[in-house]
Amino acid sequence: MSNAPRTEEDAEYKKLCENHKHLIETLPKCNGWWTPHLHNYNGFWLSPDILKANLLLHTYFKSHPTDIFLASFMKSGTTWLKALVFSTLNRHCYTFSDHYLHKHNPHSAFSPLDAESYPITDFTNSSTPRVFSTHFTRTMLPACMSSCKFVYVCRDPKDVLISMWHFMNKIRSKDLPPLSLDEAFELFCLGVSDYGPFWEQVLSYWSASLEYPDKILFLKYEDMKKEPEVVVKKLAAFVGKPITVEEEEKGVVREIVKLCSFENLSNLEVNKEGFEKFGRLVNIEKRDFFRKGVIGDWKNYLTKEMKERIDGITAQKFKGSGLIFTATG
Ligand code: PAP
């Protein structure tokens, strides 16, 4: 159980927030993507409210041994992963013709740790086991979480950049001028983006997955696109609910893949209208979680030089790690 205070008037909570505010004021800062600034904390860039959420996590979040965390860099496939994990875990609770995901955006299935509302929440989570999502780098998570299971999804950084650039311009403060692709590209390459540097964040989970393969399932968006049924079976086994031969014969895996496909989810009324609330930090239009859902859209935006620069950074950063990206052109 969490020991979160009940109200914002809690003295301990207020003191902690004051300390965090002072700490953040001392940190290096840079231009942000949707907020005016990002702050560098222990090598990673975060917007002030998300950094506050991270700092509070260390005091108030108490993990359960059975918790599962869905981790990713932004725009790498979290929405899809949430839908797949929810429908796999709860496949005995719904029929595929009348499903929770027909009426709810996948983000409402599991809470994001990074934007939880403090201090009212006590991290209640209706699912069993509890499932949370996070974009924090592994090294910024409370130590109590290290014995829990993680599913991590990564994606070609070129597609991440383009997806993020579109998304950030949608949620960017109206007081700021639009973020140009040139500026976004430069910031991304320098590692200055929410939760970045991208490469260090990915590597934090990749190396942990090599060390604890039974605790961290490391997935790639590109593999999920190519072989979604294989991924669903892996996920089911990983969360302790393996698909049986009988289920496979009945087409359960195929149904999960179909339900969670970009084409299906993006065309549901529930994902076309309205907002998804992330703690008390931000309201996001549900349709903004679904743009194109393809591999290689970067080709429509990046020049040859830009592509080569990102691929060069990726090759240099991942050298010797064993992590190889499926070539997308
Ligand atoms: P988040 O970081 O805000 O949670 P996330 O879900 O990780 O976003 O990534 C969004 C990307 O996944 C979008 O990619 P795009 O901009 O290149 O199109 C979105 O379209 C894509 N996406 C969302 N749902 C699915 C899905 N069911 N299948 C494949 N891709 C999807």
Image (cartoon, rainbow, N blue to C red):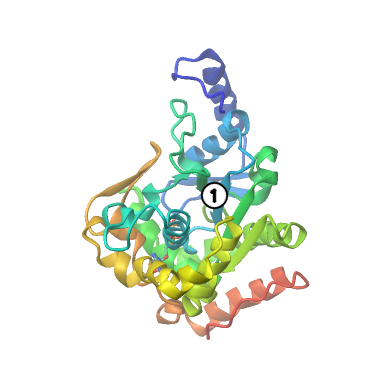
- Foreground residue among 82 and 75: 82
Q: Amino acid at mark 1?
A: Cys
In percent of width and height, residue 138 lies at: 65, 50
In percent of width and height, residue 80 lies at: 43, 63
Horizontal relation, residue 319 to residue 121: left or right: right
Q: Secondary structure at mark 1?
A: strand
Please determine whether, in this image, residue 49 is positioned above or below residue 257: above
- Crowd rating for badge 1 (residues with CA inside 10 Å; few <14, some 14–19, many 20+): some
Residue 155 in sight: no
- Foreground residue among 159 and 28: 159
- Foreground residue among 214 and 13: 214
At 54% from the left and 81% from the top, the residue drawn is 305
In percent of width and height, residue 162 lies at: 44, 69
At 31% from the left and 57% from the top, the residue drawn is 99
At 56% from the left and 54% from the top, the residue drawn is 71
Quarter of the rendered structure image containing ligand 1: bottom left
Residue on which disc 1 sits: 30
